[in-house]
Image (cartoon, rainbow, N blue to C red):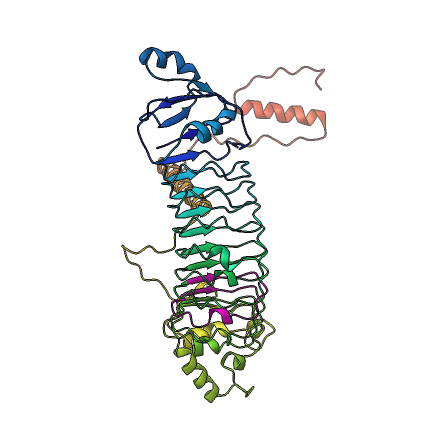
């Protein structure tokens, strides 16, 4: 079943189409859920429950002529919600999208018992309520609203698997509010005001937890969430990760931009593959080897590691061959690590004790592919393997522009070479047509005489010059 809503300024008409399984309200239509008095014409035929709202004001007459028995009535945008809530019971709807509107109250969904996914993000909802009939609901998206507490609104949703409540106003999460939703596998509570996640310790099937940018100072006990695989608690004020201790299935942990001074509270996690603890207060990196031998990606940048000795927790401050050997043996235990980020620590700054750490780390850890974002190995050229990661749209455009300019310059150079060669050949041909010796002449023509100051002398020179060329000049006495 499919229901389509155009913009609010258009006129909507009701026609019947074949059965689908989706209802969607287009983003930006801004449907308001205020009570509206409307008296729509009821549908008596139970098979005609499939409704489509389309802008067919110009086609109204043609539809009437084509099917005189078809029930047809015109409604405006304000009556859409009333039609949806009062007359038509979309019992076979699976996906309902009413995001990016002005909805403030969740209501009139009791008849959508087969609903699987409900999208209500970017509205003005303040309370989770009226979900009693949605017992088959699996995905609920309520991010970017104004919800302050969960309350009892999720009690009927026992099959819920994905819950998004990020970017709301939650300040507390009670264990009784989420206890009925034991099938939850993914929860996003980012960008709220939570100071505790103790209410999540009742979700045995939880696999993904996002609590970014809250007010957490400690991760409380989550030992019942044994299936946790990914946790992101970045941008908080956490100094203690003991609540994640013993989670053997944990593979990804992001705890950047917190106040961690040690990772001992987390304990050993042999299955951890990716760790991001950048922008904290860690003073040594030996825990990478001791606690997480299976690490593949480690980001410990922008911490407080000042010397190489603090990397391996050595007491001596002298860099000796014995120290280097121990350091190499320790780091060699991280056999699976392929990406390492240590930039921003005091020891590797220009004024630090090891500003040229890059080459030494490459020698000690030859298995590294990426060190501080730079590739350390030359990639082999293989036809079936891409030479680089996919570029963004802006990068692709700039590359095409550069390629076009290079092609244009190459074309200009080729045209210049052709023109230069043609002109040179023309010059050579002209030179070949010239005689090898200068032509001989019996008459020696002297240059025109130079002028003198006297008038008489100029006339005499002119007569002499004319005689040579058989010219006749008339000279009178006045000229003298």
Residue 210 in the figure: left or right of residue 334: right
| 247 falls in the magenta region | yes
Question: What residue sits 70% from the left and 24% below the top?
Answer: 456
| Image location of residue 201, percent across then percent down | 47, 63
Most common SS among magenta residues? loop
| 306 falls in the magenta region | no
| Image location of residue 455, percent across then percent down | 71, 25
| Image location of residue 92, percent across then percent down | 34, 36
Whether residue 436 is visible here, answered yes or no, is: no
Foreground residue, 192 or 281?
192
Residue 449, located in which quarter of the rendered image?
top right
Residue 474, located in which quarter of the rendered image?
top right
Foreground residue, 137 or 135?
135
Whether residue 418 is visible here, answered yes or no, is: yes
Question: What residue sits 51% from the left and 55% below the top?
Answer: 189
Q: Which quadrant of the rendered structure holds the N terminus? A: top left
Question: What residue sits 46% from the left and 55% below the top?
Answer: 187
| Image location of residue 430, percent across then percent down | 38, 35
Q: Identify the magenta region.
A: 230-257
């Amino acid at each position: 079943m499919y229901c389509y809503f155009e913009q609010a300024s258009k006129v909507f008409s009701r026609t019947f189409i074949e059965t689908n399984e989706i209802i969607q309200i287009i983003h930006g239509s801004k449907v308001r859920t205020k009570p509206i008095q409307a008296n729509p014409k009821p549908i008596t035929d139970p098979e005609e429950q499939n409704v489509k709202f389309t802008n067919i004001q110009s086609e109204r007459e043609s539809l009437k002529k084509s099917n005189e028995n078809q029930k047809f009535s015109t409604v405006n945008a304000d009556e859409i919600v009333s039609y949806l809530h009062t007359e038509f019971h979309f019992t076979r709807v699976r996906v309902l999208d009413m995001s990016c509107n002005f909805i403030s109250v969740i209501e009139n969904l009791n008849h959508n018992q087969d609903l699987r996914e409900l999208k209500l993000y970017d509205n003005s909802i303040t309370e989770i309520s009226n979900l009693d009939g949605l017992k088959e609901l699996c995905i609920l998206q309520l991010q970017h609203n104004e919800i302050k507490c969960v309350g009892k609104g999720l009690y009927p949703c026992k099959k819920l698997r994905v819950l998004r409540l990020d970017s709301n106003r939650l300040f507390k999460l009670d264990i009784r509010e989420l206890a009925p939703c034991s099938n939850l596998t993914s929860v996003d509570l980012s960008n709220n005001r939570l100071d505790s996640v103790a209410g999540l310790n009742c979700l045995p099937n939880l696999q993904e937890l996002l609590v970014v940018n809250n007010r957490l100072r400690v991760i409380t006990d989550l030992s019942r969430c044994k299936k946790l695989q990914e946790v992101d608690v970045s941008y908080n004020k956490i100094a203690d990760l003991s609540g994640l201790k013993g989670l053997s299935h944990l593979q990804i942990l992001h705890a950047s931009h917190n106040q961690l001074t040690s990772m001992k509270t987390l304990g050993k996690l042999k299955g951890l593959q990716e760790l991001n603890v950048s922008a904290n207060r860690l003073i040594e990196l030996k825990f990478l080897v001791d606690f997480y031998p299976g690490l593949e990606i480690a980001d410990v940048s922008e911490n407080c590691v000042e010397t190489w000795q603090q990397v391996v927790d050595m007491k001596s401050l002298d860099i000796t061959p014995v120290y280097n050997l121990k350091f190499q043996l320790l780091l060699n235990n991280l056999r699976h690590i392929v990406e390492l980020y240590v930039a921003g620590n005091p020891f590797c700054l220009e004024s630090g004790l090891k500003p040229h750490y890059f080459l030494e780390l490459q020698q000690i850890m030859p298995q590294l592919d990426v060190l501080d974002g730079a590739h350390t190995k030359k990639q082999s050229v293989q036809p079936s393997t891409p030479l680089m990661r996919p570029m963004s749209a802006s990068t692709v455009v700039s590359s095409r522009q550069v390629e076009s300019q290079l092609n244009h310059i190459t074309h200009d150079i080729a045209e210049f070479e052709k023109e230069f060669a043609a002109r040179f050949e023309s010059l050579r041909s002209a030179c070949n047509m010239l005689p090898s010796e200068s032509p001989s002449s019996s008459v020696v023509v002297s240059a025109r005489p130079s002028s003198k100051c006297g008038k008489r002398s100029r006339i005499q020179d002119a007569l002499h010059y004319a005689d040579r060329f058989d010219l006749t000049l008339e000279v009178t006495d006045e000229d003298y």
